[in-house]
Image: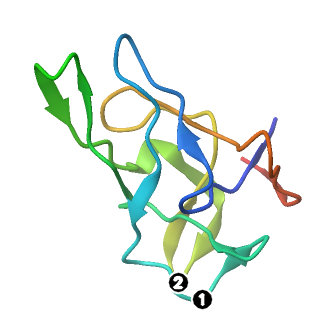
Amino acid sequence: MFSTLAREFLDLTFGHGCFAQTPCTIELANQTVFVNGLRALTVGAVFAPHSCAGLDVHTPVATPSTGSTRVFIRNIQAVTTYKPMSCGDVIVNSITFPPRLFVGI
């Protein structure tokens, strides 16, 4: 199975239930690896908070379950697409600017 490395700002969460899509807003671990000019995400990446009708708000975080088992950036797992995050949401690729780097997971 192949997946792609997730990128900051451009790749979004898919959204779940009535929670809308949200972009990655903070990436503290990776300052050196870029995919199509955007920083590749690593485990610990934080996404913008999303809410369900303004009643429940939470912040999705890339957990080890979203990380690649084979690709590491400075000894931290690189985040790949289509794996569950802390809230059950998944990261999907941008349709308008698809990535060109695929990884075996």
What is the C-alpha distance between the residues marked 2 and 1? Answer: 9 Å
| Within-10-Å neighbours for mark 1: few <14, some 14–19, many 20+ | few
The picture quadrant where one finds residue 38 is bottom right
Give whichever of discs 2 and 1 has the lower sequence position.
Answer: 1
17, 76: nearer the viewer: 17
Q: Quadrant of the N terminus?
A: top right
| Amino acid type of the residue tagged 2 in the rendering | Arg
CB contact under 8 Å: marks 2 and 1: yes
Query: To which residue does mark 1 refer?
Result: 32
Does residue 36 appear left or right of residue 60 in this picture?
Answer: right
Dot 2 falls on a residue whose secondary structure is loop
Q: Going by the picture, which residue comes out furthest to the left?
A: 55
- Residue 52, how many percent across, how many down? 24, 18
| Amino acid type of the residue tagged 1 in the rendering | Thr
- Residue 94, how many percent across, how many down? 71, 44
Q: Which mark is residue 74?
A: 2
Does residue 9 appear left or right of residue 95 in this picture?
Answer: left
Examine the rendered structure and indicate whether residue 55 appears above or below residue 74.
above
The picture quadrant where one finds residue 28 is bottom left
